[in-house]
């Protein structure tokens, strides 16, 4: 269990930073008084302070100095200047975790003092509801204890697996970006029912619950998705008509391409 008295500081309190902060507090990973957040945009910080009772500062170095674990949640494009500004305050007793898409471990290790312990993580926005899917890749100075800490933090907000850094761009394309591929699916299926006369609220509820139920069934039974699909498709029934429509539209290739394109973009971000 992560020591609740350990101080965690977030640099960047935007969509993902705030989702993770809510998730770790809800999971009891850290007490609000031991959680700090820095951001250049003060209204975000004030909202978080009011909602979660955490410490805030518009000065990244104030939060960095006070933290044992520093979680970087700024955009990849902002990261260079953030690292430059922080490097004087990063000492070897701190663990640095970054969730920036695409940015390789070597970038942090080169920008920060020699020996800095860095872990690269790709979570997703479902950390807000403790259902994130995260990949974790340790840098060359991270200890097994650091990996355990990162796995504990990200398992507390969902499911976390350790992967090699070479696969982190694919994690980004699949589970990092993935929620944005599924939300339109939920909306579009609901649209179909609305077209048939269902009210919007019921359609969205039934659509979202259908996706949740299908995912849960797969994770809990361990069955292959093809086998589960076969359980729903009665011969000459309704479902096979729908499956045929999806295959005609090339939906499988479209989803594969979505993951591949997002992965390619993650690789591009890492080259900048
Ligand atoms: N949004 C998502 O679903 C996911 C995002 N990520 C990664 O998380 C990181 C943050 O993404 P989002 O939260 O979506 O972006 P965001 O734009 O919502 O948040 C970034 C925050 O950084 C702040 N910021 C900008 N410059 C700063 C500076 N110099 N010092 C301190 N704070 C500064 C901004 O004011 C903003 O609140 C990115 O690197 C992204 O690749 C990873 C997984 C999922
Ligand atoms: O779209 C992005 O770049 C970020 C990384 C993964 C999810 N959102």
Image (tube, rainbow, N blue to C red):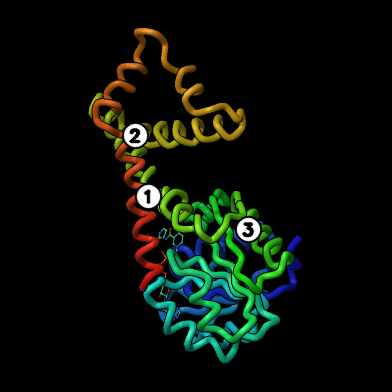
Task: Relative to 80, say whether 252 is above or below.
Answer: above
Q: Quadrant of ligand 1?
A: bottom left
Q: Residue furthest top?
A: 236
Which one is in front in this view, the residue at disc 2 or the one at disc 1? 2
Task: Relative to 232, say whether 66 is above or below.
Answer: below
Is the CB of mark 1 within 8 Å of ligand 2? yes
According to the image, label 1 marks what residue? 180
Q: Position of residue 118 (x, y in %)?
A: 60, 72
Write the residue at 35% across / 16% down.
240
Chain-order first, disc 3 or disc 2: 3
Q: Which mark is residue 26?
A: 3
Q: Is residue 49 visible?
A: no
Chain-order first, disc 1 or disc 3: 3
Q: Secondary structure at mark 3?
A: helix
Q: Position of residue 253 (x, y in %)?
A: 31, 37
Dot 2 crowding, Cα within 10 Å, few <14, some 14–19, many 20+: few
**3 and 2 marks in contact (CB < 8 Å):** no
Dot 1 crowding, Cα within 10 Å, few <14, some 14–19, many 20+: few
Q: Secondary structure at mark 2?
A: helix
Q: Nearer the viewer, residue 69 or 54?
A: 69
Task: Relative to 245, say whether 251 is above or below.
Answer: below
Give the CA distance from mark 3 to mark 2. 36 Å
Task: Relative to 228, say whether 124 is above or below.
Answer: below
On-image quarter of the C terminus? bottom left
**In which image quadrant can residue 251 be found?**
top left
According to the image, label 2 marks what residue? 252
Q: Position of residue 247 (x, y in %)?
A: 29, 26
Give the CA distance from mark 2 to mark 1. 16 Å
């Amino acid at each position: 269990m992560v020591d609740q008295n350990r101080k965690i500081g977030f640099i960047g309190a935007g969509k993902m930073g705030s989702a993770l902060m809510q998730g770790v507090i809800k999971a009891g990973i850290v007490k609000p008084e031991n959680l700090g957040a820095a951001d250049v945009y003060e209204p975000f910080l004030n909202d978080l302070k009011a909602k979660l009772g955490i410490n805030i500062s518009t000065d990244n170095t104030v939060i960095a100095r006070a933290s044992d674990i520093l979680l970087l949640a700024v955009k990849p494009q902002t990261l260079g200047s953030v690292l430059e500004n922080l490097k004087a305050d990063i000492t070897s007793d701190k663990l640095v975790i970054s969730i920036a898409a695409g940015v390789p471990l070597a970038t942090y290790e080169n920008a920060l003092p020699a020996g800095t312990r860095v872990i690269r993580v790709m979570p997703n926005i479902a950390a807000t509801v403790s259902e994130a899917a995260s990949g974790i890749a340790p840098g060359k100075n991270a200890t097994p204890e650091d990996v355990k800490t990162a796995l504990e933090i990200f398992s507390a907000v969902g499911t976390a697996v350790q992967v090699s850094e070479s696969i982190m761009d694919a994690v980004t394309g699949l589970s990092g970006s993935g929620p944005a591929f599924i939300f339109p699916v939920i909306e579009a299926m609901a649209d179909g029912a609305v077209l048939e006369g269902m009210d919007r609220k019921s359609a969205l509820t039934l659509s979202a619950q259908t996706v949740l139920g299908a995912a849960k069934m797969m994770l809990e039974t361990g069955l292959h998705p093809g086998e589960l699909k076969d359980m729903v498709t009665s011969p000459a029934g309704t479902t096979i008509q729908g499956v045929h429509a999806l295959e005609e539209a090339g939906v499988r290739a479209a989803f594969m391409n979505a993951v591949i394109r997002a992965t390619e973009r993650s690789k591009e971000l890492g080259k900048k």
